[in-house]
Amino acid sequence: MKCPVCGGAELIHDARDLPHSYRDETTLIPAVAGDWCPACGDCVLDAADGARVSAAMLEFKKLVIAGTVDRKSGRRPLRKFGHKN
Ligand SMILES: [Zn+2]
């Protein structure tokens, strides 16, 4: 199947980590199954993983809003107020 986004390449079925950004924060949604475009990097998700990815994006958005993002990766949450060096 040709990429529906750029039409430039055949899609490759694979499971990859999908980067996702909200505001200034970026996360990786692990092992997303779908058809990946080697030309533009876009992905047509498998039906089963579409729901999982949507849920992960929603969850990440909540974490960003709550300021508790990235506990898993060990990065400290952003501290915009009261930061001391
Ligand atoms: Zn493409």
Image (spheres, rainbow, N blue to C red):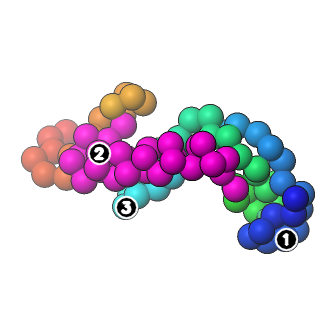
Label 2, label 1: how many angstroms apart (C-alpha)? 35 Å
- Looking at the picture, which amino acid does disc 1 mark? Gly
Q: Within 10 angstroms of label 3, few (less than 14), some, or many (20 or more) residues? A: few
Q: Is residue 16 above or below residue 36?
A: above
Of all residues shown, which one is farthest toward the front? 47
- Looking at the picture, which amino acid does disc 3 mark? Arg
Nearer to us: label 1 or label 3: 1
Residue 34 at what x, y percent from top left? 71, 46
Callout 2 secondary element: helix
Question: Could you say which is closer to the camera, residue 70 or residue 4?
Answer: 4
Q: Residue at x 25, y 53 (%)?
A: 65
Name the residue carrying label 1: 7
**Visible residue check, residue 78:** no
Q: Residue at x 36, y 37 (%)?
A: 70
Q: Is residue 83 above or below residue 37?
A: above
Label 2, label 3: how many angstroms apart (C-alpha)? 11 Å
Q: Residue at x 80, y 44 (%)?
A: 13
Q: Is residue 63 left or right of residue 2?
A: left
Question: What residue span does the magenta drawing correspond to?
Answer: 44-70
Nearer to us: label 2 or label 3: 2
Residue 59 at what x, y percent from top left? 35, 45
Given contact means CB atoms under 8 Å apart, are the residues at marks 2 and 1 in contact?
no
Name the residue carrying label 3: 23
Compare marks 1 and 3 and give the one earlier in the sequence. Answer: 1
Q: Which mark is residue 63?
A: 2
